[in-house]
Amino acid sequence: MRIFRRSVLGATLVAFVVLATACASGGDNNTKGAAGSSSGTKPSLTVGVSAAFPENQIVAEMYAQVLENAGYKVTTQEDIQSREVSDPALDSGKIDIKPEYLASELLFLDPNAKASGDPQNNADLLKPLLAQKGLDLLTPSAAQDQNAFVTTSDLASKDNLSTVSDLASVASGLTLGGPPECPKRPYCAIGLKKTYGVTFGDFKALSSGTLVAQALQSGDIDVGLLFSTDPTISADNFVLLQDDKGLQSAENITPVVRHDVDTSEVADLLNGVSATLTTDNITGLIAKVALQHQDPAAVAKLFLQDNGLL
Amino acid sequence: MGVLAKAFDFMTSAANYHGQGGIPTRLWEHVQMSLLSLGIATIIALPVGLLVGHRRRGGFFAITVGNLGRALPSFGILAIVFPLTLRYLHVGSLGFVATLITLILLAIPPIMLNTFVGTREVDRDTIEAARGMGLSGTQILMRVELPLAAPLIVAGLRTAATAVVATATLGALVSWGGLGRFIVDGLAQGDKGQLVAGAVLVASLAVVTEAMFALLQRAISPRTTGSPRRHIRKLIRRPGWGM
């Protein structure tokens, strides 16, 4: 029996070491050395992203790379779950900069806010809410990414679906798939019911857009919530249902920065990135990452170089 | 209100005790999934462990496979298995098969390792004695090695069961139910009460599982304090042994 104990102890140790090594190398944080080592006085900055998806990652990489190029020491912290986790991370200074979506962040901070399809309106409403928490909203980019309800081309032709309104008569027999927070969100289940009178028969919580697309394809869900810039929509021949009653609001990608680190240089650098982004070019960049499996950092770098920002 | 108070409210609210999303349904789903995966893992791992231990060959293979298996991250397995099940094994509710396969793979290594080690470590003199009394290889395996290895096998089941109960929470990431639903939804919706209630429920279920296997382990452990040889003599003294 003593031999057994020793071998189990050994086995456990081996397993533990292997696991520990796996954990140590599997972390998401990567600190990058400052590119321009000329200035030692510039602060270290952390760019953080809610739920890692290619678009978020690419934009965060752009922010990180222009700052790094200007001599800041930049850390990226990707996939900080939903806003319930990433917003407190920003408030408490665990991260300094976050790419945000105007209306989603506005409605997150104030569920009763009058978000609309006008980016300026949303930015004006969001600014004071962020200011209360010591956060600055920089200039919104032209790039929009909205929540979109999509379905398969088969179902769309069978039930004659082209708008979200068309769902009203058939939804009770259909299953909706989306992120686990969907049932509690105004832009998702709550808004569907309030604005469109659409209530689905069932809801399946899927923790990423990739899973939503996979479940749509396999027929496990009939309608899925995806981002309008998701390249799988065209790749898988999904049909994007038109938001005919304007449930979704302007979601321009905009940097949010902690006021303490928001110098004019940092603001100029980040606004420079915003100025080059459009819905079309970001959709193209996402396709490179999501469909061609290119590295988000490399895709971001090439884009910044092409636009003279690096 | 503190997080624990919110969790207490969640667990005591009558609204959370009926329907598809209620605590009893989620708990039952969790228990069913855990039992099913543990059962299937046992059917696979027990014979392999017994055979390798009985032959006293292939031990290096068994230990290597067992340890590598233990190092595999369940979350990674789930992420790989889920799309595959959607394409090739499309049965049950969404995420069910993927979660089941992940948990089976998690439970196999401890059961197989403990069965193998328990069988191999049976005293050689005891086996010689059994052989001398005319027992065949199969009889030695079933009547001597298996009973003597039983406490260790149950210890392996205990390890596997606790890990399975804790890890079944991952199923919620791929739309399956179980108690993990409360943790994943609570985190996504910023509902800390739901999150903590889910965590407390899973931890409680794991503790209950652990306790039940501890009792089982005590029940089947030989009561003799002496050498296994005395135990075998006792076994053989029983009537109906064809002697």
Image (spheres, rainbow, N blue to C red):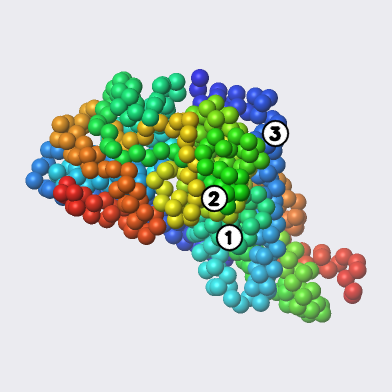
Mark 2 crowdedness (10 Å alpha carbons): few <14, some 14-19, many ≥20: many
**Mark 2 or 3: the one toward you:** 2
Dot 1 amino acid type: Arg
Subunit ID for the residue under disc 1:
B
Q: Position of residue B237 (x, y in %)?
A: 86, 67
Q: Residue B19 has which mark?
A: 3
Dot 3 amino acid type: Gly
Subunit ID for the residue under disc 3:
B
Q: Position of residue A197 (x, y in %)?
A: 58, 29
Callouts 3 and 1 on one subunit: yes
The secondary element bearing badge 1 is classed as helix
Question: Can residue B207 be seen by looking at this rendering?
Answer: no
Question: Quadrant of residue B193 in the image?
Answer: top right
For residue B232, above or below residue A112: below
Name the residue beneath numbered marker 2.
A152
**Mark 3 or 1: the one toward you:** 1
Query: Which residue is drawn at the image coordinates 35% and 48% (left, top)?
Result: A283
Name the residue beneath numbered marker 1.
B87
